[in-house]
């Protein structure tokens, strides 16, 4: 990435509906240059999507919690369900309230971020998660406030600056 890539990313991050022609005008480069940079950033995996960012709260899910899951260590079938991280990941992906899941190191085996309509509804979501017999145990923490929302743009700024020096 170079300075122009960084400027393209910054512009589209702040105004994703701008369009290539307007972006070229604002950046002072040819339309084809902007399109080529966007294509390169997409094919390189730097830009991963163009969809709208959605707010779980505005959709009626104001409660966010983090679940640390312990997973059965064997990958054999247990009560008709295959164990292992991939199978548990597929189970979690089928639950709409699970908005993120990661295999982790440390005290647990997998971490999931879930949302719910209320604290009472959170119990329903946790029960859905725990319905997979490959999950042995879980612990839950409920968020009170978001201090730093999910963000990647500062990394792009650092990556661009690092490549220029």
Image: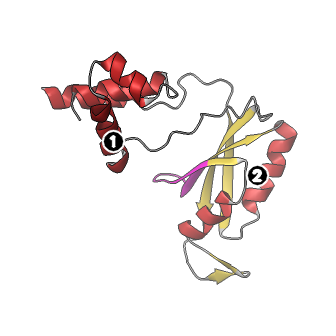
Residue 79 in the figure: left or right of residue 146: right
- Mark 1 touches mark 2? (CB < 8 Å): no
Q: Does the stretch in magenta take in 101?
A: yes
In percent of width and height, residue 72 lies at 60, 70
In percent of width and height, residue 81 lies at 69, 77
Query: Dot 1 lies on which element?
Result: helix
Quadrant where the image shows the N terminus: top left
Identified at 35% across, 18% down, the residue is: 25
First of labels 1, 2 by sequence position:
1
What count of labels does the image hold?
2
Q: Nearer the viewer, mark 1 or mark 2?
A: 1
Q: Please tell me whether residue 123 is drawn above or below residue 129 in the rendered image.
A: above
Between residues 47 and 162, which one lies in front from this camera angle? 47
- In the rendered structure, which segment of residues is drawn in magenta? 100-112
Residue 41 marker: 1
In percent of width and height, residue 136 lies at 67, 65
Between residues 27 and 144, which one lies in front from this camera angle? 27
Residue 5 in the figure: left or right of residue 105: left
Residue 126 marker: 2
Q: Please tell me whether residue 63 is drawn above or below residue 148 in the rendered image.
A: below
Q: Please tell me whether residue 8 is drawn above or below residue 68 in the rendered image.
A: above
Q: CA distance from mark 1 to mark 2?
A: 38 Å
Q: Does the stretch in magenta take in 96?
A: no
Disc 2 crowd, CA 10 A, few/some/many (<14, 14-19, 20+): some
Residue 58 in the figure: left or right of residue 15: right
Residue 32 in the figure: left or right of residue 16: left
């Amino acid at each position: 990435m170079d300075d122009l890539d960084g400027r393209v990313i910054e512009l589209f991050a702040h105004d994703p509906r701008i369009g290539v022609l307007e972006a070229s005008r604002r950046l002072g480069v040819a339309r084809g240059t902007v399109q080529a940079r966007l294509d390169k950033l997409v094919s390189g995996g730097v830009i991963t999507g163009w969809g709208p960012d959605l707010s779980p709260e505005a959709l009626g899910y104001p409660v966010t919690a983090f679940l640390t899951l312990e997973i059965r260590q064997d990958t054999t079938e247990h009560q008709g369900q295959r164990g292992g991280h991939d199978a548990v990941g597929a189970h979690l992906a089928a639950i709409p309230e699970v908005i993120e899941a990661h295999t982790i190191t440390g005290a647990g085996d997998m971490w999931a971020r879930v949302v719910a309509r209320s604290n009472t509804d959170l119990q329903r979501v946790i029960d859905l998660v725990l319905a997979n017999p490959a999950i042995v145990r879980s612990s839950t923490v409920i968020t009170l406030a978001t201090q730093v929302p999910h963000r990647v743009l500062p990394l792009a700024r650092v990556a661009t600056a690092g490549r220029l020096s």
